[in-house]
Amino acid sequence: METTALNIVVLIKHVPDTQFDRHLSGPDNTLDRSESILSELDEYALEAALQLVESSGSAAGEARVTAVTMGPAQAVTAVRKALQIGATDGVHLSDDALAGSDAAATSLALATLVRHLGPVDLVLTGMSSTDGETSLVPAQLAARLELPQLTFASTLELFDVDGVRKVTGRRDGDAYSYQLEAILPAVVSVTDQINSPRYPNFKGIMAAKKKTVTTLSLADLGLNPSDVGRSGSWTDVVEAQPRPVRAAGTIITDDGDAGIQLVDFLAAQNLL
Amino acid sequence: MSAVLVFVDRPATGLGKPTRELLTLARRAGEPVVALAGEASTDIVAALGSYGVSRVLNSAQPELSEYLVAPKADFIARAAELADARAVLIENSTEGKEIAARAGIALKAGVITDAIAVAADLTATKSVLAGSYTSTCRVRTPVAIISVKANSIEPAEAETPTEPAVEAVTVDFGPASLAVRIVDRQDKPVSTRPDLSEARIVVAGGRGVNGDFTPVEELADVLGAAVGASRAATDAGWIEHSAQIGQTGKTVSPQLYISAGISGAIQQKAGMQTSAVIVAVNKDAESPVFEIADFGVVGDLFKVLPQAAEEIRRRRNS
């Protein structure tokens, strides 16, 4: 069924490890990114891309899965990890002027970057970043690129109708479950229900050493620095306060009446 | 006074609590105007009037429900222009946030999601980094788009009800907005329990329930609570995925959160640590959940939960 080999861009983000305490600081209340990793939720997008390539019958070496990130110098670590897992090549958009970008500025930079990379079949992303947690970027990226937005997919398949390549996926909401369909190229985000991401193996780690990571700046994309970063953002974080640490409460060991003591506690808090 | 637009999406029967909250917020921040998708029935328009809505911009175009998200964003963008709105308020559901995202691009408007409070000057408060920080945000654009979490304000009707003028709006959808078609739609059965995101009380079970949610559900029902779960429990298939609370599930902030058989690792904590009161029941005294619990029981949930449910029934009957 294949006409041409698949060309997929996977957007990944280098984010502070959620296993540890995270901090906001500085005049713009930005996030300390020193202890960062490839966002866990992006691994599902990468895995989805690799599975689509594997099931498409594309000849080895023909299909492309490009891992793309924007972020400070150390964000290249996330791209390297993606190459070890199986991405074929990487792109790192790195420019000091990008610091402090909100979703609007991020989606502008990424849309410009995707256009710069040339025609693609799919732009795949995770369901959200694990730091900003807004889920705005995939929708804004699709809107800016004027591409179909098939988001929060928990299944994903490509199929062909009279030579037209299409994508279909399931989207589960609280009140509904939808089967969605779009013509490629499309922007697709996937949930953590879609697959079990693979780990890099020894062969993958060795192979990654020979793969290319292209570093681009805003000038390479023809983007004006004032259109991104803090100056290009449409929102401000005016203030950020750490949440007060929860004081330790009363802990009891059940001697047979803990359920009753629990109800006593609820009654004392006027919660019954 | 400038208009604050509230998006109301095809209300089936009456206005939901999240909508009534948004209308209350809109009235405090400006003149409440509604973008209503679906039929503008007499009942719905009257209900909007009781919240002081002056104007209803209505579209019942079939594209709004035949395609994913994008047509709704186009409708809101058009309605915001017609109303010359300074702000758009929308529910903070998965879909609501995506509609906000796209309307933001269309209107060149800053988008703030997950607001837990919105001041009259449209400064929004939100809980960030999995509840470990509280931040205050503002947009820098002429129009603000804010998605607001449920339970942000007590809904209040206007002192003087209005008779909103209903104006039909026809949106000219571009091809990019009609690109993701809903080819099959299955409505999920409506639960008799409160919605997880809106509930005042949540009882949640995890690995410790070992496949049997009965004691969790029994206590939830006696308290009129919603039922939640940890990722371990939803991944195991013991309960539907939409019940998941945590980093990749729902974030809840109820008056009371009862955690049963959940260790409280960071992924789970992310979804519930802003709850007003936390009660934990777990066999393992070393569980991290006890570090954030106001009241903790080291014990067997299969004994403690039924005993608590029985005690609540006994007190109510005496």
Image (cartoon, rainbow, N blue to C red):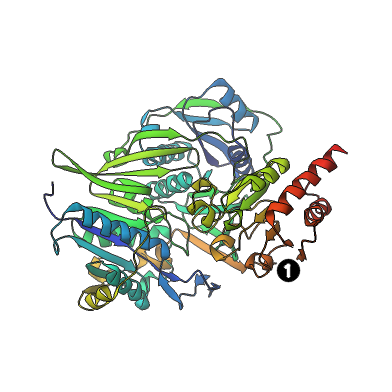
Q: Nearer the viewer, residue B126 or B78?
A: B126
Q: As drawn, which residue projects farthest toward the left?
A: A3
- The residue positioned 53% from the left and 70% from the top of the image is A29
Give SS at disc 1: loop
Chain where mark 1 sits: A
Packing grade of label 1 (10 A; few <14, some 14-19, many >=20) is few
Q: Nearer the viewer, residue A241 or A55?
A: A55
On the picture, is A107 further left or further right than B6? left
Q: As drawn, which residue projects farthest toward the right?
A: B318
Quadrant (top left, top right, bottom left, bottom right) of the N terminus of chain B: top right
Give coordinates of residue B61: x percent, y percent: 39, 28
Q: Is B107 situated above or below A251?
A: above
Whether residue B180 is visible, yes or no, is no
Q: Nearer the viewer, residue B207 or B1?
A: B207
- The residue positioned 64% from the left and 59% from the top of the image is B274
Quarter of image, res B32? top right
The amino acid marked with disc number 1 is: Ala
Give coordinates of residue B121: x percent, y percent: 60, 52
On the picture, is A228 further left or further right than B318? left
Q: As drawn, which residue projects farthest toward the top?
A: B42
- Please state the total of marks drawn on the protein image: 1
- The residue positioned 49% from the left and 71% from the top of the image is A31
Quadrant (top left, top right, bottom left, bottom right) of the C terminus of chain B: top right
Q: Is B10 situated above or below A212?
A: above
Give coordinates of residue A257: x percent, y percent: 81, 56
Instruction: Give the residue pinned by disc 1.
Output: A247
Whether residue A101 is visible, yes or no, is yes
Give coordinates of residue B123: x percent, y percent: 58, 55
Q: Is A195 situated above or below B59?
A: below
